[in-house]
Amino acid sequence: MKSYQLLRLTGAAFAVAMAAALATSASAKVLARVNGAEITDEDVKIALEDIGQSLPQQIEGPARQAYILDYLIDAKLVAQKAEADKMGEGPEFAKKVAYYRDKVLMEDLLGKVAKDAASDTAIQKTYDDVAKQQKPEEEVRARHILVESEADAQAALKRVKGGEDFAKVANEMSKDPGSKGGELGWFTKERMVPEFAEAAFKMQPGQISDPVKSQFGWHIIQVEERRQKQFPPLDQVRDQVTRYVVQKSQSELILKLREEAKVERTEPEKPAEAAPGAAATPAPAAETKTPANPAAPASSSK
């Protein structure tokens, strides 16, 4: 294997270099030759998978392919120069090659596991299991007017009790920039500060509260609707559920491999570096992260 083909050791460049060390497959189309070294459409595909997401979005279609080909030509030229300078020789270079070979193998296997795991059946089952575990929870849709003093709150209350439109008064008086017309959308009790939540969840649709004081100021609350919290349909949370299924399958594989392997640490684990003035605590043992519950991001929308 020519060592210049291993100069660029990250991502696609390394994968392309490994592929270039083998005979060009019969189906590969040669797109360029750099001092006799061939770059094929298969090389472009590998590089695109690696760095495609980092390219500017406006580079699309044929321009994207051309960009990647130019990148590979430049990489090949630089690699050839590095080879001529004998930068591909020595034990340190060999160690880097071994590291990135393991990395590519790991990514390929985990990618295969992800593809196999993320079936429609597995995604549907995971979604159904989580949906069944959800406990009934009430939520309300409300508006509010937030002001700085009780006197301002009483003035706002007098206007809405007198028949003025709540949203109009909120637009004119409220100090909450994030709620147009005072609209807060749907929310569960724990999402709001205690004083606000207690008042809102005691009210029925159409009712308007007396002034309520919280850490943010004084509120006038109007409850518009109440309902049981709705679990979102699968099409709204498919991405979250898919990530959970993939992460779970990958984590299970790694844990299984650890259990079956003989791993010997030759050095004791060092304590985590503490901030100045803080007591150092032992670093936790290396472990595979357990994927988050896929229900976590499945909150109700406004």
Image (spheres, rainbow, N blue to C red):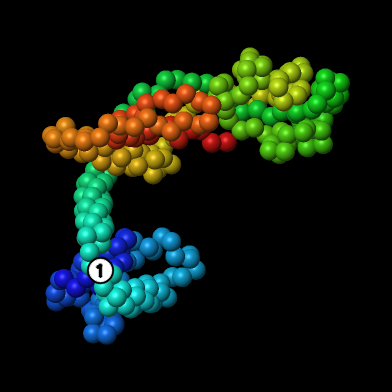
- What residue is shown at x 25% (from left), y 68% (from top)? 88
Comparing 253 with 168, the one in front is: 253
Residue 58 pos. (x, y %)? 49, 68
- What residue is shown at x 41% (from left), y 37% (from top)? 233
User: Is residue 230 toward the left or the right of residue 103 in the image?
Assistant: right
> Is disc 1 surrounded by few (<14), some (14 to 19) or many (20+) residues within 10 Å?
many
Residue 37 pos. (x, y %)? 23, 80
Q: From the viewer's perspective, is residue 242 above or below residue 12?
A: above
- Quadrant that contains the C terminus: top right
Residue 173 pos. (x, y %)? 82, 33
Comparing 238 with 31, the one in front is: 31
On the image, numbered disc 1 is attached to which residue? 88
How many labels, in total? 1
Q: From the viewer's perspective, is residue 208 above or below residue 170?
A: above
The quarter of the displayed image where residue 118 is located: top left
Residue 214 pos. (x, y %)? 71, 20
Comparing 179 with 203, the one in front is: 179
Inspect the image, locate mark 1, and give the three-letter code of the amino acid beneath it.
Answer: Gly
- Mark 1: which secondary structure? loop
> Taking the image as drawn, is residue 43 in sight?
no
> Taking the image as drawn, is residue 232 in sight?
yes
- Quadrant that contains the N terminus: bottom left
Q: From the viewer's perspective, is residue 297 above or below residue 68?
A: above
- What residue is shown at x 44% (from left), y 26% (from top)? 280
Comparing 278 with 299, the one in front is: 278
The quarter of the displayed image where residue 242 is located: top left
The quarter of the displayed image where residue 161 is located: top right
User: Is residue 83 toward the left or the right of residue 274 in the image?
Assistant: left
- What residue is shown at x 76% (from left), y 17% (from top)? 210
